[in-house]
Image: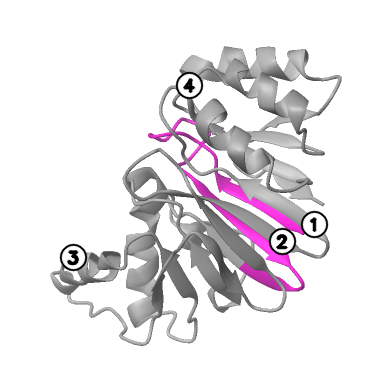
Amino acid sequence: MRITFFGSSHGVPEPNRKCSCAMVEAGGRKYLIDAGTDPVDELVKRGIGISEIRAVFITHLHGDHTDGLVHFLDLLSWYYKEASPAFYVPKTELKDAVKPWLSIQGVELREDLEFSGIREGLFYDDGVLRVTAFRTGHIDVSYAFMLEAEGRKVLFTGDMKHVTGPVDDYARYAETADFDLAVAECAHFDAMLYEAPLRKNPPKLFCFNHYSPRYEESCLHLRESVKDVVPVLMANDGLVIDL
């Protein structure tokens, strides 16, 4: 399994980090998690065909995780018509919300594009990738994902509960499986709150994603504090992790 970070920033873009979007590759197939930045730009830059994207999984509907989705759907509707990724979203009303915006641009959203609502538990299995959703306390409907493929397990936390996410959300997910990689946010709390759950159930590798500059120092502090149990990475745009 390979993870490529197209965007690793928090609620707003930074000079060298765009908003959240990652590509997952497994078994010759490609998938996206979130679309806070336009995935088309990143795919074209890497010479990857748009039709290679099999499915898109959205953790929650805040703009820094979905704003790039509008342009993606625009281009799928009139240009990349051979591409038909499946979309898995927290609320299927997203489809109806996008339609009028595209319509005033003179574009009609393709009716054959599939939008499915995410439910807690195993919700996706194409024979290569299995995706399980866990509810988070971030907003009314928001999710973390467990990805399973090629004998590997990866946790994407999405955005978690403000102030106490590592204690109330992450600690619960960490007990679910022995993760090869945990990709965790740090935009809403001090990173040192991860220390206890990491010591109790350490993944093989821990990677900060969607982290805010105000908590970056605490991320570095945590990396030093838990280096005896788990290596810690800081994601930047373009980072590739091979498992």
Q: Is residue 51 visible?
A: yes
Q: CA distance from mark 3 to mark 2?
A: 35 Å
Per the rendered image, the range of residues in magenta is 1-30
- Mark number displayed over residue 152: 1
Task: Give how far apart the Cα atoms at labels 1 and 4 are.
Answer: 28 Å
Residue 89: name its quadrant.
bottom left
Mark 1 to mark 3 CA distance (whole Å): 39 Å
Circle 3 residue: 101
Q: Quick check: 191 above or below 168?
A: above
The kind of residue tagged 2 is Glu
Residue 57 lies, in percent from the top left, at: 50, 62
Residue at position x 17%, y 76% in the image: 106
Q: Which secondary structure lies at badge 1?
A: strand
Going from N to C along the chain, the mark reached first, 3 or 2, is: 3
Q: Which of labels 3 and 4 is toward the front?
A: 4
Residue type of the residue flagged with mark 4: Phe
Circles 3 and 4: CB atoms closer than 8 Å:
no
Name the side, left or right, on which 148 lies relative to 50: right
Name the residue rendered at 39%, 38% in the picture.
138
The type of residue carrying mark 3 is Trp
Q: Is residue 236 visible?
A: no
Contact check, label 2 and label 4, Cβ < 8 Å: no
* Labels 2 & 1 near each other (Cβ < 8 A): yes
Mark 4 Cα shell of 10 Å, populated few (<14), some (14-19), many (≥20): many
CA gap, disc 2 and disc 1: 6 Å
First along the sequence among labels 2 and 4: 2
Q: Residues within 10 Å of mark 1 (few under 14, many from 20)?
A: some
Coordinates of residue 216 in the picture (x, y in percent)? 56, 18
Residue at x 82%, y 20% (from the top left corner): 227
Read off the residue under disc 4.
189
